Image (cartoon, coloured by chain):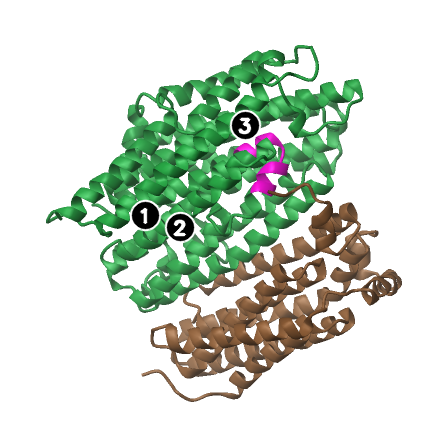
Amino acid sequence: MPSSTTTPLDLLEVILILTTFIVTTTPSVKQIISTYRLQSILLAMVTTVAASAKAMKSYSAEPREFNVAIWILFIALLPILLAWAIKPLLVRATLAGETSTLGFLFHRSIQRQLEEEAERVWRQYKAATREQFHLLIFLILVFVAFYIAFRIIAGDFSLSERVGLAVSMALHLIGLYNMFAKQDIIAQVIGLLIMDHGLYLAVIKIVEIPVPATFFVISLYFYTLITMFILVILLPRVRRETQSIDLSEIAAKSKLKG
Amino acid sequence: MPILQLDLATLAVLTISIPLLVGLIGVAGILFQAWRFPRFRKTLDFLTVFASAVSLALSLWMALISKAEHLTPSLALPILGRIGFLIDSLSLYFILLVNVIALAATWNSIEWLKAKSGDQHALFHTLTNLFHVTMLLVPLVDNLIILWIAIEATTLVSTMLVGFEGKKDSWEAAWKYLVITSTGIIFALLGTMFLANAAKGLIPKDDPNIIMNWSFLIKNAGLLNQDFVKLSFLFILVGYGTKAGFAPMHTWLPDGHGEAPAPISALLSGVLLKSALYAILRFYTITNATLGNAGFTSKILLGSGLFSLLLATPFILKENRFKRLLAYHSLEHMGIITFGVGIGGPIAMFGALLHTFNHAITKALMFLSFGNILRQYEQAFQEKGWPFDQTKIAGVLQSMPFTGAVLILGGLALVGTPLFNIFVSEFIILWGALDNLNLSRSPSPTRVSHFPAWIVITAVAIFVLSTTLIFFGLVRHLAQITLRQMPMEQKLNESLSDRFLLGSLLLVAIIFGFGVVQPLARLIAESVNIVLNVK
């Protein structure tokens, strides 16, 4: 019989949706970064609490479940990693990779100088126009996610699992919409990163990672590696070749049509 | 029997190891700047083609000695424990497919690379070999999570190859390709996790690692949670379907195939799409075995196949750059394969699996021959100081008679003209659909149709109408390229090596137009039994 009670973790998950609204509708890139970092920390907290609860419950009785809990803890590092990397990576993408990746990531004075230059570009960032329209769509998407989680999907899910499923789906849908509806590279990256958060949450909350948890955690790390690849290697090259972060401008000049 | 098992496992490891080794030599060449020496570049050329040829020979050997049974040898690794390989007829069939096209693509790349700088030379061979390795890993692994990792690894390597030309359009295409397929692959990972949840109660005490092995799941399919399995299949179809180029997630196809170098376009269209299809087939089998019939999966796949076919048609009919047009043909043919799988039953499934081979051969032939034409015309335009664009290519039959003739014949094969390979597999799929129609009118005690007669008739009508329209669309494009007045009065170079390669591919397309060569027919028939889970 699935449990019908909610936990404080469920409330934290709902806050993830609110932070997603801010990340995807604010016109300020600096605010996007700080809110995204807050969301990452919240997600890391959810992961740690969920894993610790599972570990305590299974420590003596279920050694296999205890191992699973320990592997889930490794997932908490992923949002932290993205929170740490988002600003330098967006700066690098904006400035078309004018310095070496390692020097940029680890050399503080180079970082500070480039951040100032990037912020000048970001001040002209206009992706958040029509934010009320986007917000309306996001609300509809959240409604759809909750409707699917509570009304359409069958199976023995507890109330807490259904909330997790709904929030995870909402993050996926909003991320996906952000990527395809907004015509700039920053919005696309943010969309992808929000979807990553949705994926982590799904793994932690909905999918009770079975043995072997190792493979699932490795696959999540591998997926995050791909995200990093996009941000570190590909995005600066696209930006360097196109000289724009505005995809509608790139598309207007592009020969890739039809 | 143990000797046979050891042999197959060893051959499988060798098949992967040889291109991996050459890839690592390429990495060393880049790190130590050995690409500056012409001898290193020539050696790398030779080694890359040699690795593909040996890998193909080994996979043929595996196909010849294999029996119609599953073999799951495993490899012990630190932390991960034992990693199982799955070597059955279906995986061997896809390994063979990968190796055939890899040999054609690497062979063709030698001529293409002559105009490139030394560092590009080494980088291209390195990435191509690694791409080859990742595509071989997909059909070889038993664990479905490692299968996901292998498919994601193909994306990582191939993105660099799509953007290899380093032009604005190439990077834009690489960006779209990576972002769209990475988005899709999230769904595939969730689908895999849902399947894991479906098997939660089945974890074996002695070896819990095998819980996500396909060979274990198929044996215990009847015990899986049906709700989770259904959810898993839907997520898998969206996730791997994005990579396989199913509509409406196909939008990366025309850009990716259109902007990649021709040998890479051949690999992307010929085998990469099929690697994702292979993954879908493995989940399809588990889903059907769990639900007890193919009704759920068949309806979704038939709808998906027809949608892809319908969507491809207007894009092939309209004016477009030829490589993009070929990419839309990939959408069409993936639609035809999915149509065949959706129809189901042994006949249509045989046709669908045969079509994966026929499409791979024909599309490689088209991309490689058009790639040669593109290269020669671009060079000729540059020499004259004229601006070049793909749309300016004309009169190929006069300037490059052999390649022009191959392009025409390959094009005719691609649109399903009788006496060519594609016609045979399309015909078998339609035969399967009509057999289904008979079943829906008078069900047999052993086989059932999942569709009412009117759906089968409508589906067949859409299939025939789309393929007919596409036939006229491609013929019109081919006539413009080959027969229209050529812009310059000169013969362009057609190397003996390229002529041999294109001639060989065309010969295969013609031979398979008269029937399926026996060892391959056996392999496909056994693969059909695996996909349909017939003991």
In magenta, the rendered stretch is B254-266
Residue that badge 2 annotates: B304
Q: Which chain is brown?
A: A
Give the distance between the C-alpha atoms of the residues marked 3 and 2, in whole angstroms. 27 Å
| Horizontal and vertical percent position of residue A198 | 55, 69
In the image, what residue type sits under mark 1? Gly
Q: Nearer the viewer, residue A190 or B481?
A: B481
| Horizontal and vertical percent position of residue B358 | 40, 30
Q: Categorize mark 2 by other alpha carbons within 10 Å: few (<14), some (14-19), many (20+).
A: many
Q: Which chain is green?
A: B
Q: Chain of mark 2?
A: B
The secondary structure that dominates the magenta segment is helix
Residue that badge 1 annotates: B342
Q: Is residue B40 above or below residue A4?
A: above
Q: Is residue B122 visible?
A: yes
In the image, what residue type sits under mark 3? His
- Is the same chain shared between marks 3 and 1? yes
Q: Categorize mark 3 by other alpha carbons within 10 Å: few (<14), some (14-19), many (20+).
A: some
Give the distance between the C-alpha atoms of the residues marked 3 and 1, in whole angstroms. 31 Å
| Disc with the residue nearer the chain's start (2 vs 1) | 2
Q: Is residue A220 above or below residue B489?
A: below
In the image, what residue type sits under mark 2? Ser
The secondary element bearing badge 2 is classed as helix
Which residue is drawn at the image coordinates 51% and 52% (left, top)? B249
Q: Nearer the viewer, mark 3 or mark 1?
A: 3
In the rendered structure, the answer to whether residue B276 lies left or right of residue B171 reads left
- Disc 2 vs disc 1: Cβ atoms closer than 8 Å? yes
**Quadrant of the drawing holding the N terminus of chain B:** top left
Residue that badge 3 annotates: B477
B259 inside magenta stretch: yes
Q: Which image quadrant is residue A128 in?
A: bottom right
Q: Is residue A39 visible?
A: no
